[in-house]
Structures are given as structure tokens and as C-alpha cells.
Image (spheres, coloured by chain):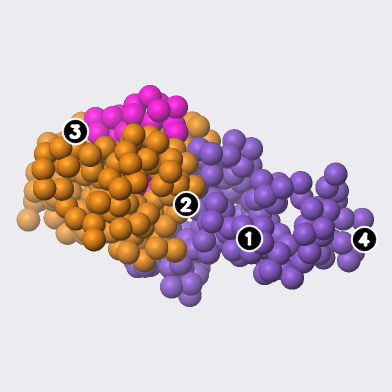
Chain colours: A purple, B orange
Amino acid sequence: MPEEPKTERGRRTRERIVAAAAGLVERQGAEATSLDQVLAEARASKSQLYHYFADKHALIRAVIAWQTATVVDGTAEQLAGIDSWDGLDAWFDTLVAHQQALDCRVGCPIGSLAAELADTDEAARQDLARSFDTWAAQLRAMLDRLRDRGLIRPDADTAALAQSTLATVQGGLLLAKTSRDPQRLRAALTAAGGYLRSLAPLPGRAAP
Amino acid sequence: MPEEPKTERGRRTRERIVAAAAGLVERQGAEATSLDQVLAEARASKSQLYHYFADKHALIRAVIAWQTATVVDGTAEQLAGIDSWDGLDAWFDTLVAHQQALDCRVGCPIGSLAAELADTDEAARQDLARSFDTWAAQLRAMLDRLRDRGLIRPDADTAALAQSTLATVQGGLLLAKTSRDPQRLRAALTAAGGYLRSLAPLPGRAAP
């Protein structure tokens, strides 16, 4: 039976296997990634791999958790610091610069996994839905802050706005990856930011 | 050497193979789809398949062309008829109703293929980029019509707006597919429509 690592050395071995798998899945997709490739990339043995993972399916779920920690938790700090339009624009600039640095390869690892696995791996789909929900919750907290500061109307539905902002980011990343053109992402983010700005309280109307 | 069908019967055989492959790829992805599965689904022989396609790679490119004809050309007529906000909303309603009818499976076949293949199959990536460009051109023509009718400001960048609208549709489809919740797509489309409406000419300002 696979188990959680009990020692620091075991923890490092497990992490090395998951990180290697995540890199392969990012470059070529989950279906195309074989356990033999993962072992070669991680310089790990079959017995080490099966010590921690029952099968490839379990490893892919660990990759989803790893990418969620990297991508979603990785943006948490930046999103938590946004309390102005300038702050939002700075986050958008970071996203575009990151894609430019990657030559628009990869896109969003969570989005790519979701596109590939949502219809074929129900457990993975649920994991990925939770990853998106975590991301949307971070966005919503940021939008609530903009609303509390009077930048967005008090009656704005920040839960729906968080979903639409996340959708626009994901779609922009997909178009940028397909065209290798970061300006597709830029256009999407300009629209996402423009829509939020259009929800500013109407001028001349007193705050409630 | 593979060749184009010369007879009506040959054309139908080729079409049957591509449609079977498209259905399998839609349900399980390109990488997970084997030629044996395609042959079984299409009730075709290996010699029939290799008569029209050199290899799986060529078949996948035919699937991309088939899905582009189905999805992108399929929306052309509806997009060409939109000349008001009501018309735009009706198209958005169609998209949400279609996902509801599919229980939010599949999402956009073009988007799913792009997410899976953009980093591993350069010829497929270029095909898919052209599919998105065709779609964006249809959206731009629709937005130009809205602008010419005075619904959108004359100086609005309709090329960029077409890209951002397409991105928001794609992202909304991905979130809906991952969560099995059509309201994620609805939220994205509300934002896309809301942003376009926010670009209406300013009230009280004379038309140029």
C-alpha cells in the first residue's frame, strides 16, 4: 500500500517524483506522460514510485496538488496585496510578462490539466474544480476589497465577477499559448480590467 | 501515398473516419485516441484509413479541420445576424443552453484540442491558431456592425475586443466543463457583454 513519507529523505524523494511528473505533464500532457519517463526524469526507482503512489492516476492527482500549490497558492500573496486599480494592473502585467518569458508555452498548468482530464478522470476533475474554486475565492476577496474601498459598486456580485475574471484570464492564456502571442492575453486582461472599472459607483451619486 | 477521395463513396468513407475520430478525441483527447479505436468506431479497415491519412498525426489535423467546420463555421451564420445587444445576448443564451444540454461535458472542441496539442504538435498548433483567427474575424465583423450602428464607440479597437470576447467565451467554457456548472460560462458571458456595453458612446456627446 502506498504511504505518506515518514522521513525527510522520503519526503524529498516523493517531491522529486511529483516535480518531475509535473514538468513532463506540463510539456506533453498527462496522457502522453509515462511512468518510465517520470522515473528517468526523477532518477527514481520503480519501488520508490510505488512506495508513494498506487498508480499513474494517483501520481497525476499529486501533480494537480503540486501545480495548485505552485500556481494558485503562488498568486495568493500578490492577490492579497491588491487594493487599487494600479495593483490589479500590476498583477495583469506580471501574467503577461510571465507568458512572454515562457514564449507563451505551457499557458496555465491548471487550465491545461482541466481541459485534458475533466471528461476522462472524475477524481481529477473534482480536484481541478477545487483548485479553480480556491483561485476564485482569492479573486473574490480582492474584489471585495476594491468594493469596500469604493472602487466597485456596493451591489456588485463579486462572486460572479471573480468567476468571470478567472475565465478571462484562462481564456487569454489559452489564446496566447495557441497563437504564441502574449497580446492575446493582454487583450483579455484589458477587457477584464475594463469591465471591473465600468462597475465603479456612478459619479454624482452619494455613497450608500 | 494518402490521397483525397475521388468518388462520392470515397468521400463518405473519409468523412466517416474523420467524424468517428472527432467524437473519440472530443470524449477522451487526441493522445488517448488510438487508430484501432477509430477503425472500430468508423467500421473502416486499416487500408481504408491509410488510403486517406498517412498517420495519426494527419488524421488529427483532419479532425481539427472537421471541428473548425462544425464549431467555427457553425457559428458564422448566427454571428453574421447579430446587429444589436439583444442579438448578442441571444447568441450567449445559445452557448449556455448548448453546454447545459451537454451536461457541460466537452466544452469547446477547438479549445480542448488547443490546450492539449499547442505545445506538442506544431502543425496542429498552427491549424488551431488559424481556427481561432477565423472565429475572431467573425466576432470582429459583428463588433464592427455594432460600432457602425452606434452601439460601440467609433474609436473602439474591435480587433482587440474580438480577441477578448473569444478569450472570455473559451475561459467560461473551460470553467463550466471543469465544475460541470453552466453558470460559470454565464458569469463569463455577462462580463463579456457588460464590457462591450460599457464601450457605448458617452451619453450627451454628439456622434462624430
> Relative to B166, is A82 above or below?
below
> Real-space Cα distance between discs 1 and 3?
44 Å
Which residue position holds label 1? Answer: A22
Please give the name of the residue rendered at 23% of the width and 39% of the height, measured from the top-left corner: B13
Q: Do discs 2 and 3 belong to a common subunit?
A: yes
Say left or right for A187 vs A11. left
Q: Decide: marks 1, 4 in contact (CB < 8 A)? A: no
Q: Which amino acid does label 1 sit on?
A: Ala
Which residue position holds label 2? Answer: B31
Give the image quarter of residue B185.
top left
Please give the name of the residue rendered at 77% of the width and 50% of the height, measured from the top-left corner: A53
Which residue position holds label 4? Answer: A7
The region drawn magenta spans B89-111
Which residue position holds label 3? Answer: B87
Within the magenta stretch, is there residue B112? no
Q: Between tags 1 and 3, which lies in front?
A: 1
Q: Between tags 4 and 2, which lies in front?
A: 2
